[in-house]
Image (cartoon, rainbow, N blue to C red):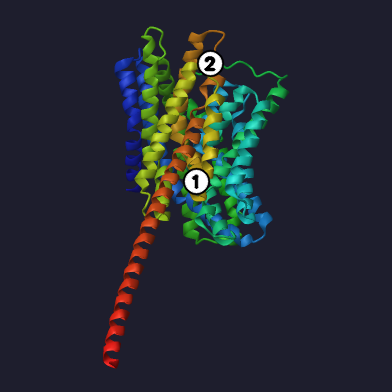
Amino acid sequence: MKFLRTLKEVFLSSLPLAAIIIAVCGFIAPMKDVFDYVKLVVGYAGVVFGQAMFLVGLDISILPIGKLIGSSLIRLKKTIFIIFFGFLFGLLATVAEPALSVLARQTHMIMRLVDETVFIWVMGTGIGVFVGFSLFRVLKDMNIKTVFVALYAMTFALIIFTPEEFVALAFDGSGATTGDVSVPFILALGIGVSATMSKHKSVEDTFGIIGLASVGPIISLFLYGIVLKAMNGGVIPPADLYDPGTAENFGGIVASNLGDVALALFPVVICFLPFHFFLIKLPRSEFIRMLLGTAVVYVGLLIFLSSIDFGFAFAGKYIGEVFLDPARPAWFKWLLLIVGFILGAAITLTEPAVTVLGEQLEEITNGHVKKMTMRGTLAIGIGVAALICMVKIITQINILWFLIPLYIVSLLMMKYTSKLFVSLAFDSGGVTGGALTSAFLTPLTLGTAQAVAATAGPGGQSVLTNGFGIIAFISVTPLIAVQALGILYDIQLKRVQESALANELAGLEKLASYAGQTNGTKGSEEDGGNE
Protein backbone atom coordinates (compact mmCIF):
# COMPACT_ATOMS: atom_id res chain seq x y z
CA MET A 1 0.00 0.00 0.00
CA LYS A 2 2.79 2.40 0.87
CA PHE A 3 4.51 1.74 -2.44
CA LEU A 4 1.28 2.37 -4.35
CA ARG A 5 0.73 5.68 -2.50
CA THR A 6 4.29 6.75 -3.24
CA LEU A 7 3.98 5.65 -6.87
CA LYS A 8 0.83 7.77 -7.18
CA GLU A 9 2.55 10.81 -5.66
CA VAL A 10 5.59 10.46 -7.94
CA PHE A 11 3.34 10.00 -10.98
CA LEU A 12 1.32 13.13 -10.15
CA SER A 13 4.51 15.13 -9.58
CA SER A 14 5.74 14.07 -13.03
CA LEU A 15 2.56 15.06 -14.91
CA PRO A 16 3.83 18.56 -15.88
CA LEU A 17 6.81 16.88 -17.52
CA ALA A 18 4.56 14.36 -19.24
CA ALA A 19 2.35 17.18 -20.57
CA ILE A 20 5.34 19.01 -22.04
CA ILE A 21 6.73 15.79 -23.56
CA ILE A 22 3.37 14.89 -25.14
CA ALA A 23 2.78 18.42 -26.45
CA VAL A 24 6.21 18.75 -28.07
CA CYS A 25 7.00 15.20 -29.15
CA GLY A 26 3.44 14.30 -30.09
CA PHE A 27 2.08 17.48 -31.70
CA ILE A 28 4.60 20.33 -32.15
CA ALA A 29 7.48 18.23 -33.52
CA PRO A 30 6.60 14.53 -33.90
CA MET A 31 9.63 12.23 -33.93
CA LYS A 32 10.37 10.26 -37.08
CA ASP A 33 11.71 7.07 -35.51
CA VAL A 34 9.10 4.89 -33.75
CA PHE A 35 11.83 3.50 -31.48
CA ASP A 36 12.29 7.01 -30.06
CA TYR A 37 8.73 6.84 -28.73
CA VAL A 38 9.51 3.46 -27.19
CA LYS A 39 12.54 5.02 -25.48
CA LEU A 40 10.39 7.86 -24.16
CA VAL A 41 7.75 5.51 -22.73
CA VAL A 42 10.31 3.14 -21.18
CA GLY A 43 12.39 6.02 -19.83
CA TYR A 44 9.40 7.85 -18.36
CA ALA A 45 7.90 4.71 -16.80
CA GLY A 46 11.29 3.68 -15.41
CA VAL A 47 11.91 7.09 -13.84
CA VAL A 48 8.50 7.09 -12.13
CA PHE A 49 8.69 3.47 -10.94
CA GLY A 50 12.36 3.66 -9.94
CA GLN A 51 11.92 6.90 -8.01
CA ALA A 52 8.90 5.48 -6.13
CA MET A 53 10.81 2.34 -5.23
CA PHE A 54 13.84 4.40 -4.20
CA LEU A 55 11.75 6.64 -1.91
CA VAL A 56 10.01 3.70 -0.22
CA GLY A 57 13.33 1.99 0.45
CA LEU A 58 14.78 5.28 1.63
CA ASP A 59 12.03 5.64 4.20
CA ILE A 60 12.70 2.27 5.81
CA SER A 61 16.49 2.24 5.63
CA ILE A 62 18.62 5.27 4.77
CA LEU A 63 16.50 7.89 6.54
CA PRO A 64 16.24 5.99 9.85
CA ILE A 65 19.99 5.31 9.64
CA GLY A 66 20.60 9.05 9.27
CA LYS A 67 18.40 9.92 12.25
CA LEU A 68 19.96 7.24 14.43
CA ILE A 69 23.47 8.40 13.60
CA GLY A 70 22.51 12.02 14.21
CA SER A 71 21.06 11.26 17.63
CA SER A 72 23.95 8.97 18.65
CA LEU A 73 26.69 11.28 17.41
CA ILE A 74 26.34 13.58 20.41
CA ARG A 75 27.26 10.70 22.72
CA LEU A 76 30.82 10.98 21.43
CA LYS A 77 31.00 14.30 23.38
CA LYS A 78 34.39 15.46 22.08
CA THR A 79 34.13 18.23 19.47
CA ILE A 80 36.78 16.71 17.19
CA PHE A 81 34.85 13.43 16.93
CA ILE A 82 31.58 15.20 16.18
CA ILE A 83 33.20 17.26 13.41
CA PHE A 84 35.00 14.21 11.96
CA PHE A 85 31.86 12.08 11.78
CA GLY A 86 29.94 15.07 10.45
CA PHE A 87 32.49 15.18 7.62
CA LEU A 88 32.39 11.40 7.09
CA PHE A 89 28.63 11.02 6.88
CA GLY A 90 28.20 14.22 4.90
CA LEU A 91 30.61 12.71 2.37
CA LEU A 92 29.02 9.26 2.27
CA ALA A 93 25.44 10.51 2.11
CA THR A 94 26.34 12.80 -0.79
CA VAL A 95 28.00 10.13 -2.93
CA ALA A 96 24.71 8.19 -2.70
CA GLU A 97 22.70 11.18 -3.99
CA PRO A 98 20.87 10.26 -7.24
CA ALA A 99 20.83 13.84 -8.57
CA LEU A 100 24.62 13.97 -8.30
CA SER A 101 24.97 10.65 -10.14
CA VAL A 102 22.79 12.02 -12.95
CA LEU A 103 24.89 15.18 -13.22
CA ALA A 104 28.13 13.17 -13.19
CA ARG A 105 26.93 11.07 -16.13
CA GLN A 106 25.86 14.14 -18.09
CA THR A 107 29.19 15.86 -17.41
CA HIS A 108 31.27 12.83 -18.45
CA MET A 109 29.25 12.50 -21.65
CA ILE A 110 30.27 16.03 -22.69
CA MET A 111 33.70 16.25 -21.03
CA ARG A 112 35.49 12.89 -21.15
CA LEU A 113 38.31 14.41 -19.12
CA VAL A 114 36.02 14.24 -16.07
CA ASP A 115 35.75 10.81 -14.47
CA GLU A 116 32.25 10.09 -13.10
CA THR A 117 33.40 8.45 -9.87
CA VAL A 118 36.07 11.06 -9.13
CA PHE A 119 33.53 13.83 -9.84
CA ILE A 120 31.08 12.36 -7.30
CA TRP A 121 33.71 11.91 -4.59
CA VAL A 122 35.16 15.40 -5.14
CA MET A 123 31.70 16.90 -4.67
CA GLY A 124 31.03 14.64 -1.69
CA THR A 125 34.29 15.73 -0.08
CA GLY A 126 33.23 19.37 -0.46
CA ILE A 127 29.95 18.64 1.32
CA GLY A 128 31.67 16.62 4.04
CA VAL A 129 34.23 19.33 4.84
CA PHE A 130 31.57 22.01 5.09
CA VAL A 131 29.18 19.85 7.13
CA GLY A 132 32.02 19.51 9.63
CA PHE A 133 32.57 23.27 9.48
CA SER A 134 28.83 23.90 9.95
CA LEU A 135 28.78 21.83 13.12
CA PHE A 136 31.89 23.70 14.30
CA ARG A 137 30.06 27.00 13.66
CA VAL A 138 27.16 25.88 15.86
CA LEU A 139 29.49 24.78 18.64
CA LYS A 140 31.50 28.05 18.51
CA ASP A 141 28.41 30.26 18.09
CA MET A 142 29.64 32.01 14.91
CA ASN A 143 27.25 34.55 13.35
CA ILE A 144 25.74 32.79 10.33
CA LYS A 145 25.36 36.01 8.30
CA THR A 146 29.06 36.84 8.65
CA VAL A 147 30.00 33.28 7.70
CA PHE A 148 27.88 33.34 4.52
CA VAL A 149 29.37 36.67 3.40
CA ALA A 150 32.94 35.45 3.98
CA LEU A 151 32.39 32.12 2.20
CA TYR A 152 30.75 33.58 -0.90
CA ALA A 153 33.40 36.34 -1.11
CA MET A 154 36.03 33.59 -1.12
CA THR A 155 34.05 31.58 -3.68
CA PHE A 156 33.75 34.40 -6.21
CA ALA A 157 37.41 35.35 -5.72
CA LEU A 158 38.36 31.76 -6.64
CA ILE A 159 36.46 32.05 -9.94
CA ILE A 160 39.33 34.19 -11.28
CA PHE A 161 41.56 31.08 -11.37
CA THR A 162 38.89 28.56 -12.41
CA PRO A 163 38.48 27.34 -16.03
CA GLU A 164 35.25 28.82 -17.42
CA GLU A 165 33.97 25.32 -18.29
CA PHE A 166 33.80 24.52 -14.56
CA VAL A 167 32.09 27.69 -13.26
CA ALA A 168 28.43 26.96 -14.07
CA LEU A 169 29.06 23.22 -13.55
CA ALA A 170 30.30 23.84 -9.99
CA PHE A 171 27.18 25.79 -9.05
CA ASP A 172 25.02 23.09 -10.65
CA GLY A 173 26.90 20.43 -8.70
CA SER A 174 26.28 22.31 -5.47
CA GLY A 175 22.52 22.10 -5.97
CA ALA A 176 22.66 18.46 -7.03
CA THR A 177 24.56 17.35 -3.91
CA THR A 178 21.69 18.13 -1.52
CA GLY A 179 18.64 15.96 -2.13
CA ASP A 180 16.64 12.96 -0.90
CA VAL A 181 19.59 11.12 0.68
CA SER A 182 21.99 13.80 1.88
CA VAL A 183 19.51 16.33 3.32
CA PRO A 184 18.00 13.99 5.98
CA PHE A 185 21.50 12.95 7.08
CA ILE A 186 22.78 16.50 7.33
CA LEU A 187 19.64 17.82 9.04
CA ALA A 188 19.75 14.94 11.53
CA LEU A 189 23.33 15.82 12.42
CA GLY A 190 22.49 19.51 12.75
CA ILE A 191 19.40 18.97 14.87
CA GLY A 192 21.24 16.60 17.20
CA VAL A 193 24.17 18.97 17.70
CA SER A 194 22.17 22.21 17.99
CA ALA A 195 19.71 20.65 20.43
CA THR A 196 22.39 19.49 22.85
CA MET A 197 25.59 21.48 22.36
CA SER A 198 24.55 24.87 20.92
CA LYS A 199 24.85 27.75 23.40
CA HIS A 200 21.47 29.16 22.40
CA LYS A 201 19.60 25.92 21.52
CA SER A 202 17.40 27.94 19.16
CA VAL A 203 15.73 27.00 15.87
CA GLU A 204 18.14 29.35 14.12
CA ASP A 205 20.95 26.85 14.72
CA THR A 206 18.84 23.98 13.35
CA PHE A 207 18.60 25.61 9.92
CA GLY A 208 21.46 26.90 7.78
CA ILE A 209 23.60 23.76 7.79
CA ILE A 210 22.40 22.72 4.32
CA GLY A 211 23.08 26.23 3.03
CA LEU A 212 26.61 26.28 4.42
CA ALA A 213 27.35 22.75 3.25
CA SER A 214 26.28 23.70 -0.30
CA VAL A 215 29.25 26.07 -0.60
CA GLY A 216 31.70 23.17 -0.26
CA PRO A 217 31.03 21.49 -3.64
CA ILE A 218 31.43 24.80 -5.48
CA ILE A 219 34.90 25.34 -4.05
CA SER A 220 35.93 21.68 -4.40
CA LEU A 221 34.94 21.53 -8.08
CA PHE A 222 36.68 24.85 -8.77
CA LEU A 223 39.85 23.27 -7.38
CA TYR A 224 39.23 20.06 -9.36
CA GLY A 225 38.89 22.08 -12.56
CA ILE A 226 42.10 24.00 -11.85
CA VAL A 227 43.99 20.71 -11.25
CA LEU A 228 42.55 19.01 -14.36
CA LYS A 229 43.51 21.94 -16.56
CA ALA A 230 47.05 21.97 -15.17
CA MET A 231 47.39 18.18 -15.65
CA ASN A 232 46.14 18.48 -19.24
CA GLY A 233 48.76 21.01 -20.29
CA GLY A 234 46.69 24.08 -19.45
CA VAL A 235 43.91 23.15 -21.92
CA ILE A 236 40.36 21.86 -21.50
CA PRO A 237 39.43 19.72 -24.55
CA PRO A 238 36.43 20.78 -26.69
CA ALA A 239 33.03 19.43 -25.69
CA ASP A 240 31.92 16.08 -27.07
CA LEU A 241 28.50 15.63 -28.63
CA TYR A 242 25.74 15.46 -26.01
CA ASP A 243 23.71 12.44 -27.10
CA PRO A 244 22.06 10.71 -24.10
CA GLY A 245 20.35 7.37 -24.38
CA THR A 246 21.45 6.39 -27.88
CA ALA A 247 24.67 4.44 -27.34
CA GLU A 248 23.29 1.26 -25.75
CA ASN A 249 20.12 -0.73 -25.24
CA PHE A 250 18.36 -0.60 -21.88
CA GLY A 251 19.87 -3.87 -20.65
CA GLY A 252 23.38 -2.68 -21.44
CA ILE A 253 22.81 0.58 -19.56
CA VAL A 254 21.50 -1.32 -16.49
CA ALA A 255 24.52 -3.63 -16.54
CA SER A 256 26.96 -0.71 -16.76
CA ASN A 257 25.28 1.00 -13.78
CA LEU A 258 25.36 -2.01 -11.42
CA GLY A 259 28.77 -1.27 -9.92
CA ASP A 260 28.44 2.53 -9.91
CA VAL A 261 25.19 2.46 -7.92
CA ALA A 262 26.66 -0.01 -5.42
CA LEU A 263 29.75 2.16 -4.99
CA ALA A 264 27.57 5.20 -4.35
CA LEU A 265 25.12 3.62 -1.91
CA PHE A 266 26.73 0.96 0.23
CA PRO A 267 29.53 2.97 1.94
CA VAL A 268 26.76 4.64 3.98
CA VAL A 269 25.53 1.25 5.17
CA ILE A 270 29.04 -0.07 5.88
CA CYS A 271 29.88 2.94 8.06
CA PHE A 272 26.56 2.55 9.88
CA LEU A 273 27.53 -0.91 11.12
CA PRO A 274 30.04 0.15 13.84
CA PHE A 275 27.55 2.76 15.10
CA HIS A 276 24.91 0.04 15.34
CA PHE A 277 27.09 -2.49 17.17
CA PHE A 278 28.74 -0.08 19.63
CA LEU A 279 26.28 2.81 20.17
CA ILE A 280 22.79 2.22 18.76
CA LYS A 281 22.22 -1.55 19.20
CA LEU A 282 18.89 -1.94 17.39
CA PRO A 283 16.70 -5.02 17.87
CA ARG A 284 17.73 -7.74 15.43
CA SER A 285 14.45 -7.68 13.46
CA GLU A 286 14.63 -3.91 12.94
CA PHE A 287 18.30 -4.09 11.94
CA ILE A 288 17.56 -6.79 9.31
CA ARG A 289 14.60 -4.73 8.05
CA MET A 290 16.89 -1.74 7.49
CA LEU A 291 19.43 -3.84 5.59
CA LEU A 292 16.68 -5.27 3.36
CA GLY A 293 15.45 -1.71 2.83
CA THR A 294 18.83 -0.74 1.41
CA ALA A 295 18.42 -3.46 -1.23
CA VAL A 296 15.14 -1.81 -2.26
CA VAL A 297 16.93 1.55 -2.45
CA TYR A 298 19.62 -0.03 -4.62
CA VAL A 299 17.17 -1.54 -7.12
CA GLY A 300 15.07 1.65 -7.26
CA LEU A 301 18.11 3.86 -7.81
CA LEU A 302 19.44 1.48 -10.48
CA ILE A 303 16.13 1.61 -12.41
CA PHE A 304 15.85 5.38 -11.96
CA LEU A 305 19.33 6.22 -13.24
CA SER A 306 19.21 3.69 -16.09
CA SER A 307 15.85 5.03 -17.27
CA ILE A 308 17.24 8.56 -17.30
CA ASP A 309 20.20 7.42 -19.38
CA PHE A 310 17.99 5.49 -21.80
CA GLY A 311 15.05 7.75 -22.54
CA PHE A 312 14.26 10.56 -20.12
CA ALA A 313 17.38 12.63 -20.73
CA PHE A 314 16.83 12.05 -24.46
CA ALA A 315 13.41 13.71 -24.15
CA GLY A 316 14.84 16.82 -22.50
CA LYS A 317 17.53 17.13 -25.17
CA TYR A 318 15.02 16.67 -28.00
CA ILE A 319 12.68 19.36 -26.67
CA GLY A 320 15.55 21.81 -26.28
CA GLU A 321 16.58 21.26 -29.89
CA VAL A 322 13.04 21.52 -31.28
CA PHE A 323 12.63 25.13 -30.19
CA LEU A 324 15.96 26.06 -31.83
CA ASP A 325 15.16 24.41 -35.17
CA PRO A 326 16.27 26.86 -37.92
CA ALA A 327 13.22 25.87 -39.99
CA ARG A 328 10.93 27.46 -37.41
CA PRO A 329 10.25 31.21 -36.98
CA ALA A 330 12.89 33.20 -35.06
CA TRP A 331 10.45 33.98 -32.25
CA PHE A 332 9.72 30.28 -31.65
CA LYS A 333 12.84 29.79 -29.51
CA TRP A 334 11.59 32.33 -26.95
CA LEU A 335 8.75 29.95 -26.08
CA LEU A 336 11.43 28.06 -24.12
CA LEU A 337 11.15 30.81 -21.49
CA ILE A 338 7.51 29.83 -20.88
CA VAL A 339 8.35 26.10 -20.94
CA GLY A 340 11.17 26.64 -18.43
CA PHE A 341 9.02 28.69 -16.06
CA ILE A 342 6.16 26.16 -16.09
CA LEU A 343 8.47 23.19 -15.52
CA GLY A 344 10.46 24.94 -12.76
CA ALA A 345 7.35 26.03 -10.86
CA ALA A 346 5.49 22.72 -11.29
CA ILE A 347 8.40 20.54 -10.18
CA THR A 348 8.89 22.70 -7.10
CA LEU A 349 5.26 22.53 -6.01
CA THR A 350 5.44 18.73 -5.93
CA GLU A 351 8.98 18.39 -4.52
CA PRO A 352 8.80 16.45 -1.20
CA ALA A 353 11.78 18.30 0.36
CA VAL A 354 10.09 21.66 -0.30
CA THR A 355 6.90 20.40 1.36
CA VAL A 356 8.85 19.32 4.46
CA LEU A 357 10.60 22.68 4.66
CA GLY A 358 7.23 24.47 4.42
CA GLU A 359 5.78 22.36 7.23
CA GLN A 360 8.76 23.13 9.47
CA LEU A 361 8.40 26.87 8.82
CA GLU A 362 4.66 26.80 9.55
CA GLU A 363 5.35 25.05 12.85
CA ILE A 364 8.15 27.44 13.86
CA THR A 365 6.11 30.58 13.07
CA ASN A 366 3.04 29.18 14.88
CA GLY A 367 1.03 29.17 11.66
CA HIS A 368 1.72 32.80 10.72
CA VAL A 369 3.52 31.61 7.57
CA LYS A 370 1.57 28.76 5.93
CA LYS A 371 3.39 25.91 4.20
CA MET A 372 1.59 26.70 0.93
CA THR A 373 2.95 30.25 1.15
CA MET A 374 6.46 28.84 1.40
CA ARG A 375 5.89 26.39 -1.45
CA GLY A 376 4.33 29.08 -3.64
CA THR A 377 7.22 31.46 -2.93
CA LEU A 378 9.78 28.83 -3.94
CA ALA A 379 7.75 27.81 -7.00
CA ILE A 380 7.75 31.37 -8.31
CA GLY A 381 11.45 31.78 -7.51
CA ILE A 382 12.45 28.58 -9.27
CA GLY A 383 10.16 29.23 -12.23
CA VAL A 384 11.96 32.56 -12.65
CA ALA A 385 15.30 30.74 -12.28
CA ALA A 386 14.49 28.40 -15.18
CA LEU A 387 13.33 31.36 -17.26
CA ILE A 388 16.57 33.30 -16.61
CA CYS A 389 18.61 30.22 -17.49
CA MET A 390 16.87 29.96 -20.86
CA VAL A 391 17.60 33.64 -21.51
CA LYS A 392 21.27 33.02 -20.68
CA ILE A 393 21.53 30.06 -23.05
CA ILE A 394 19.73 31.68 -25.99
CA THR A 395 21.67 34.97 -25.69
CA GLN A 396 24.97 33.20 -24.76
CA ILE A 397 25.65 35.76 -22.02
CA ASN A 398 28.23 34.58 -19.47
CA ILE A 399 26.53 33.11 -16.41
CA LEU A 400 28.48 35.35 -14.02
CA TRP A 401 26.62 38.41 -15.35
CA PHE A 402 23.53 36.80 -13.83
CA LEU A 403 24.89 34.95 -10.80
CA ILE A 404 27.03 37.72 -9.28
CA PRO A 405 24.21 40.33 -9.13
CA LEU A 406 21.78 37.72 -7.77
CA TYR A 407 24.19 36.66 -5.03
CA ILE A 408 25.02 40.30 -4.20
CA VAL A 409 21.29 41.05 -3.79
CA SER A 410 20.80 37.95 -1.62
CA LEU A 411 23.77 38.84 0.60
CA LEU A 412 22.67 42.47 0.96
CA MET A 413 19.17 41.33 1.93
CA MET A 414 20.63 39.54 4.96
CA LYS A 415 21.01 42.94 6.66
CA TYR A 416 17.23 43.31 6.73
CA THR A 417 16.31 39.66 7.31
CA SER A 418 16.18 37.75 10.59
CA LYS A 419 18.72 34.95 11.16
CA LEU A 420 15.94 32.36 10.99
CA PHE A 421 14.89 33.34 7.46
CA VAL A 422 18.51 33.77 6.32
CA SER A 423 19.16 30.17 7.36
CA LEU A 424 15.91 28.99 5.77
CA ALA A 425 16.69 30.83 2.53
CA PHE A 426 20.09 29.22 2.08
CA ASP A 427 18.69 25.81 3.05
CA SER A 428 15.92 26.28 0.45
CA GLY A 429 18.53 26.96 -2.20
CA GLY A 430 20.16 23.67 -1.29
CA VAL A 431 17.10 21.39 -1.36
CA THR A 432 15.38 22.57 -4.54
CA GLY A 433 17.75 21.00 -7.09
CA GLY A 434 16.62 17.36 -6.80
CA ALA A 435 16.85 14.26 -8.94
CA LEU A 436 13.88 15.17 -11.13
CA THR A 437 15.46 18.53 -11.92
CA SER A 438 18.72 16.88 -12.92
CA ALA A 439 16.83 14.22 -14.85
CA PHE A 440 14.91 16.58 -17.10
CA LEU A 441 15.81 20.26 -16.82
CA THR A 442 19.58 19.74 -17.19
CA PRO A 443 19.19 17.68 -20.41
CA LEU A 444 16.75 20.35 -21.61
CA THR A 445 19.33 23.11 -21.12
CA LEU A 446 22.18 21.00 -22.53
CA GLY A 447 20.13 20.16 -25.63
CA THR A 448 19.21 23.82 -26.06
CA ALA A 449 22.85 24.91 -25.65
CA GLN A 450 24.00 22.33 -28.19
CA ALA A 451 21.46 23.62 -30.71
CA VAL A 452 22.54 27.21 -30.00
CA ALA A 453 26.21 26.26 -30.51
CA ALA A 454 25.35 24.59 -33.84
CA THR A 455 23.61 27.69 -35.17
CA ALA A 456 26.11 30.20 -33.72
CA GLY A 457 29.13 28.75 -35.47
CA PRO A 458 32.78 28.93 -34.31
CA GLY A 459 32.28 32.19 -32.40
CA GLY A 460 29.58 30.81 -30.09
CA GLN A 461 29.93 29.34 -26.62
CA SER A 462 30.47 25.61 -26.24
CA VAL A 463 27.87 23.39 -24.58
CA LEU A 464 30.28 23.04 -21.64
CA THR A 465 30.17 26.77 -20.91
CA ASN A 466 26.61 27.55 -21.96
CA GLY A 467 24.72 24.35 -21.18
CA PHE A 468 25.16 24.08 -17.43
CA GLY A 469 23.67 26.56 -14.97
CA ILE A 470 20.03 25.58 -14.45
CA ILE A 471 20.66 24.18 -10.96
CA ALA A 472 22.86 27.19 -10.20
CA PHE A 473 19.93 29.53 -10.84
CA ILE A 474 17.56 27.20 -8.97
CA SER A 475 19.92 27.44 -5.99
CA VAL A 476 20.20 31.26 -5.91
CA THR A 477 16.67 32.54 -6.59
CA PRO A 478 15.23 30.94 -3.41
CA LEU A 479 17.76 33.00 -1.41
CA ILE A 480 16.02 36.16 -2.61
CA ALA A 481 12.46 34.80 -2.57
CA VAL A 482 12.58 33.34 0.95
CA GLN A 483 14.38 36.36 2.43
CA ALA A 484 11.72 38.61 0.87
CA LEU A 485 9.11 36.40 2.53
CA GLY A 486 11.02 36.73 5.82
CA ILE A 487 11.09 40.53 5.58
CA LEU A 488 7.32 40.61 4.95
CA TYR A 489 6.79 38.20 7.85
CA ASP A 490 8.85 40.39 10.20
CA ILE A 491 6.87 43.49 9.13
CA GLN A 492 3.60 41.66 9.73
CA LEU A 493 4.83 40.33 13.08
CA LYS A 494 5.90 43.83 14.16
CA ARG A 495 2.47 45.20 13.25
CA VAL A 496 0.76 42.45 15.22
CA GLN A 497 3.01 43.09 18.22
CA GLU A 498 2.45 46.87 18.00
CA SER A 499 -1.29 46.35 17.72
CA ALA A 500 -1.26 43.99 20.69
CA LEU A 501 0.85 46.46 22.69
CA ALA A 502 -1.49 49.33 21.77
CA ASN A 503 -4.51 47.29 22.84
CA GLU A 504 -2.75 46.38 26.08
CA LEU A 505 -1.88 50.03 26.81
CA ALA A 506 -5.44 51.09 25.98
CA GLY A 507 -6.72 48.44 28.38
CA LEU A 508 -4.34 49.62 31.10
CA GLU A 509 -5.40 53.24 30.57
CA LYS A 510 -9.04 52.27 30.75
CA LEU A 511 -8.36 50.27 33.90
CA ALA A 512 -6.43 53.18 35.44
CA SER A 513 -9.20 55.57 34.52
CA TYR A 514 -11.77 53.26 36.06
CA ALA A 515 -9.62 52.90 39.19
CA GLY A 516 -9.32 56.70 39.41
CA GLN A 517 -13.05 57.15 39.12
CA THR A 518 -13.63 54.49 41.74
CA ASN A 519 -11.17 56.12 44.13
CA GLY A 520 -12.79 59.52 43.53
CA THR A 521 -16.21 58.14 44.34
CA LYS A 522 -14.92 56.51 47.50
CA GLY A 523 -13.24 59.76 48.54
CA SER A 524 -16.48 61.70 48.10
CA GLU A 525 -18.39 59.18 50.15
CA GLU A 526 -15.80 59.36 52.93
CA ASP A 527 -15.92 63.17 52.95
CA GLY A 528 -19.73 63.08 53.19
CA GLY A 529 -19.54 60.62 56.06
CA ASN A 530 -17.07 62.81 58.01
CA GLU A 531 -19.34 65.79 57.69
User: In the depicted view, which residue is nearer to us: 30 or 301?
Assistant: 30
Q: Which residue is most to the bottom?
A: 530
SS under mark 2: loop
Residue at 50% over, 44% down:
416
Say what amino acid the circle numbered 1 marks: Thr
- Dot 2, crowdedness within 10 Å: few (<14), some or many (≥20)? few
Say what amino acid the circle numbered 2 marks: Leu
Residue at 59% over, 42% down:
148
- Which quadrant is home to the C terminus? bottom left
User: In the depicted view, which residue is nearer to us: 142 or 213?
Assistant: 142
Locate residue 112 relative to residue 492 in the image: left or right: right
When asked about the image quadrant of residue 18, the answer is: top left
Judging by the rendered image, the residue that carries numbered circle 2 is 241
Q: Which residue is most to the front?
A: 531
How far from the left and from the top, in percent, is residue 220?
64, 35
User: In the depicted view, which residue is nearer to us: 54 or 24?
Assistant: 24
**In the depicted structure, whether residue 64 falls above or below residue 392:** below
**In the depicted structure, whether residue 92 falls above or below residue 476:** below
Which circle's residue, 1 or 2, is located before the other in the chain? 2
Residue 273 appears anywhere in the view: yes
- Dot 1, crowdedness within 10 Å: few (<14), some or many (≥20)? many
Residue at 59% over, 27% down:
167
User: In the depicted view, which residue is nearer to us: 292 or 210?
Assistant: 210
How far from the left and from the top, in percent, is residue 415?
54, 44
SS under mark 1: loop
Mark number, residue 196: none
How far from the left and from the top, in percent, is residue 185?
53, 49
Residue 181 appears anywhere in the view: no
Judging by the rendered image, the residue that carries numbered circle 1 is 417
Asked if the residue under mark 2 is in contact with the one under mark 1, i.e. CB atoms within 8 Å, the reply is no
Indicate which label's residue lies in the foreground, 1 or 2.
1
